[in-house]
Amino acid sequence: MTDAALRIAIPEPRPRGAPLWLRRRPELVLTPLVFLVLVALWQAVAWSGVVSAFVLPAPSAIAASLVAGLRSGLFLQHGLVTLAEAAAGFAIAVAAGLVVGTLIAEIRLLERTVYPCLVAIQTMPKIALAPLLVVWFGFGPGSKIAVAAIISFFPMLVTTIAGLRDTDRGRLDVLLALGAAPLRCLVSAKLPGALPHVFSGLSIAAVFALTGAIVGEFVGASAGLGYLIVQANARLNIPQVFALLLVLGGIGVLAYGTIQALRRRLLFWAPKEERSSP
């Protein structure tokens, strides 16, 4: 039997070590491991009595409060209220950011007159505006939606402007050489080229909208997760406060993950780094 036949007949030994999926995605194991280590250390500190349970409750007490809130439906009921307020504010911010950002990017006069005013408004602490918005829109969901929209508007505005100005110049030159009107250039070249930047703004705005809804509920509300946090803090129910923070974190991760999934789905034509970047 020739050497070539021997190489075909005898399979090459597989390299020993970690599985291929683990070598490619080590974070799938390392991230849960780090989390478990931190929780174990936290639990040990709580059991040792070094830190008062009133200041830092044990993870087991937080988990019990989380399970109780989910089973009773209390967290779900108020979570839907907060989610609806954040979603409405997010939708308003996205629509306004896209429209205003496009106008500023296309009209130089607006950039010189309107954009500085928007930057000045952005520098104001939003928590200072929340009481004023409550006076204007009342204690209902309107004031929470307004806070969420204001906080998440600026990321959409900035990323839209940056995306429209980052258009491939060669593509624009081809369209202009063919006699395309400015509106055709905007629709055919600038807006598609701006989508990676826009999705980055969407990811940030989704998280900011949730923060805005919570800030509005802190100021004055009768429902929502922010309202529950204020009530739990007033009752000195610290484990429930931590449990509600975990619920908010889960909602934020879900919103961010949804935007990233849509980004990978819709930007299939873009380079890999633009499909996966935040």
Image (spheres, grey):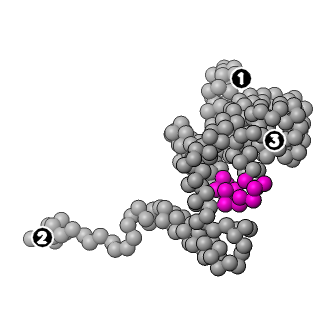
Q: Earlier in the sequence, mark 1 or mark 3?
A: 1
Q: Earlier in the sequence, mark 3 or mark 2?
A: 2
For residue 182, the mark is 1
Q: How many marks?
A: 3
Rounded to the nearest angstrom, the CA distance separating label 1 from label 2 is 70 Å
Seen from the viewer's position, the closer of residues 155 and 177 is 155
Over which residues does the magenta segment extend? 232-245
Query: Does residue 263 appear to the left or right of 97 in the view shown?
Result: left
Tell me which corner region of the image, top left, top right, bottom left or bottom right, holds residue 83: top right
User: Is disc 1 placed on a helix, strand or loop?
Assistant: helix
Residue shown at the point (66%, 53%) measured from the top left: 244
User: Is disc 3 placed on a helix, strand or loop?
Assistant: loop
User: Is disc 2 placed on a helix, strand or loop?
Assistant: loop
Whether residue 43 is situated above or below residue 251 in the rendered picture: below
Residue shown at the point (70%, 42%) measured from the top left: 224
Whether residue 226 is situated above or below residue 101 in the rendered picture: below
In this rendering, the label closer to the viewer, 1 or 2? 1
Q: Position of residue 141 (x, y in %)?
A: 75, 33
Seen from the viewer's position, the closer of residues 161 and 59 is 59
Q: Which residue is mark 2?
A: 2
Rendered-image quadrant of the N terminus: bottom left
Query: Does residue 43 appear to the left or right of 145 in the view shown?
Result: left
Can residue 112 be seen here? The reply is: no
Are the residues flagged by discs 3 and 2 in contact, CB closer than 8 Å? no
Q: Which residue is mark 3?
A: 220
